[in-house]
Amino acid sequence: MLAESVLEGLDPDQRAVAEAVRGPVCVLAGAGTGKTRAITHRIAYATLTGVVAPQRVLAVTFTTRAAGELRSRLRTLGAPGVQARTFHAAALRQLSYFWPRVVGGDQPKIIDSKVGLVADAARACRLSYGRTELRDVASEIEWAKATQQRPEDYPAAVVRAARKPSVEVVDVARVYAMYEQLRRERNLLDFEGMLELTAAVLSEHREAAQQVRDQYRYFVVDEFQDVNPLQKMLLDVWLGGRDDLCVVGDPNQTIYSFTGASASHLLDFTREHPDATVVRLVRDYRSTPQVVRLANGVIAAARGEAAARPALELVAQRPDGPEPLFSEYDDEVAEADETARRARKLIEAGVPAREIAILFRINAHSQTYEAALAAAGVPYVLRGAERFFERPEVREAVVRLRGAARAGADAETDGTGLIHTVRHVLSGAGFSDRPPEGAGAARARWESLAALAQLAEDMAAADPRAGLPEFVAELEERAAAQHAPPLEGVTLASLHAAKGLEWDAVFLVGLVEGTVPIIYAETPAQIEEERRLLYVGVTRARVHLALSWARSRSPGGGGRPRRPSRFLEGLTGRTTTPTPAPADRTRRRAARGPQPCRVCGRPLTAAVERKLGRCTGCPVELNEELLLALTEWRAETSARQRVPAYVVFTDATLQAIAERVPESMEDLARIPGVGRAKLDRYGRSVLALCGA
């Protein structure tokens, strides 16, 4: 029988989900336990056994990608008529259908972004905000609407939720009220308003509600721990008192409370539905026992209310793998360099680059890893955020720094002068010594500018003679070198952006107090959400897992050493402290400072000149035959490795090799652009061409 074949291959718990064809059903599904497999087989089994017709089923999830995956799997299982949509897609479809029938007139226009309307509302309130503040106000309005807080209720709600907006709470409430007024006057609708209006239409028009309830009689909601009060309200309207509902979620992966999501809907499901069937999925098919053991250890240490959540202790189903590696470094540069080296080693061992991820808590940390991977010749892709040098605040800061350099802003020539000048220029872009309170766009902008200030400190420490022109040249060189290939590459992502994904190898970096947990997480509930964020990071790994932290931010950094994250207490086991050889560290630091032209001795500032080691106008002998051979070798190598040619060597580096014709590894290592990783990987081939 076709229906029975759907149950084949399911483990006992997954089969229990599939056979629980009548609601209410609550599936508590741990990471990697096959929840999508279980719920799609449940839907298919229910339709194939005649419990419900496919067109009467509505499966709701949170992303179009997840909805597409559900539809694809259901088609394969013989249930092609099932509707799988996001909350917003389902609401928009219903609102568009019923509007001319029960409301009439012009249908509101959906706005993709609140920022433009927030700007108009702020001007109407005689408030002047930059784009960063506008984005933060828009985020606050989104949170308020998702949690069903009116403008007049917003200030008190912020206090209860322990939120710390970067803009005055009273001003946000004023802008929020004006935003709603302008939205109604202009017949506009945002995403939260779409859900709210759909619920209102169905609540106020019985015939519309009846039609929807006749259409959809069987509901499945995935990622139920991420449902916010507004989405729960719409779901209740759809149900209309019925209980043919199956919810699926993992309280251990509740990491979006700051957007209004609440795990209480999942945790209180049996209170709302006392007769509910509850099934726990704990068999982990994703990760090795070593990774699963660490994940269980992270979440087992939960405190306060989080400790009272339903226990979901994962049970590994895969064969043994390597133990997770814990590493402490002197500074973030060393941490990034070694992480890039390990990523390269995994790629050489046969792990595809796309199956490796480096995960960090805040997006500003990507810059250090972008640079380290580029220097090691490892291709990468950045997920969930703009590349560091493409962020608006970074582009603006580089323009300001370039202008200051042209104007001769740094009269002082010592390291202190460079640091002072860069910080002064960045202050014009909104940088200050103290970060803004709370999260949001303002904090993200500050972190990006702080990363630039830190780069200046690093350069000053490496070469006290470096000035603003050298610093700008360094930024331009970094920006030019960090273009990732479109597909194949190591993934760089924040922990939030990594949810729902998995890789063969995962590096969790920057695990220090003040970052994990983040410094603005103050309440016990906020601290525990940070713990769950680390748990999400750990459970992304299938086989290889590395966790690391650095005692200081920059090389040679003084001050009070940073402490490893409190979440690592009792978990670290063996700790290694790999440190690059002193010669390598010295050579890399020296490369950041000004270099003299090897022909005329003039200090080199332009990135291409520093690569060549000479002024572009100085006469030099070039072995054109060698340059041609090197270019052909690079093309063959990049094609074989499926990486862009620049990842092997840039044009400037090839030209420098053809000019100098190195005779030994030591000679080759002195050429800018030939780091330790590239020396190990390509050195013998390049020297063979030079010798020929």
Image: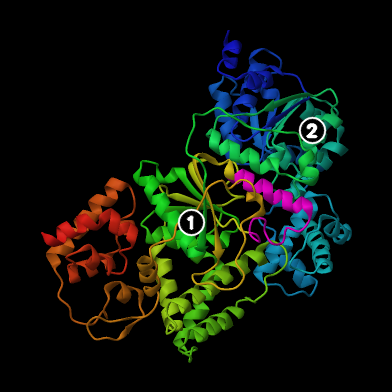
Identify the residue shown where x is 77% and y is 36%: 266
- Assess whether residue 637 is covered by the magenta stretch: no
Answer left or right for 361 relative to 351: right
Answer left or right for 199 relative to 28: right
Disc 1 marks a residue whose amino acid type is Thr
Q: Quadrant of the N terminus?
A: top right
Identify the residue shown where x is 42% and y is 74%: 474
Look at the image and give the residue range highlighted in magenta.
Answer: 513-537
User: Could you tell me how far apart the alpha carbons at marks 1 and 2 are, in whole angstroms?
Assistant: 56 Å
Q: Residue furthest bottom?
A: 411
Q: Where in the figure is residue 54, as x and y percent of width and height?
A: 66, 21
**Disc number lying in front (1 or 2):** 1
What numbered label is drawn on residue 642?
none
Q: In this figure, which residue is indicated by the disc labeled 2? A: 238
Q: In this figure, which residue is indicated by the disc labeled 1? A: 577
Question: Badge 1: few (under 14), some or many (20 or more) residues near its Cα, within 10 Å?
Answer: few
Identify the residue shown where x is 66% and y is 50%: 567
Answer left or right for 148 relative to 690: right
- Count of numbered circles on the image: 2
Q: Where in the figure is residue 347, as x and y percent of width and height?
A: 37, 46
Question: Badge 2: few (under 14), some or many (20 or more) residues near its Cα, within 10 Å?
Answer: many
Q: Where in the figure is residue 191, as x and y percent of width and height?
A: 71, 49
Residue 169, compared with residue 228, is above or below; it is below
Q: Residue furthest front?
A: 574
Disc 2 marks a residue whose amino acid type is Trp
Q: Where in the figure is residue 72, as x and y percent of width and height?
A: 55, 29
Q: Write down the quadrant of residue 597 in the picture.
A: bottom left
Which SS class for mark 1?
A: loop
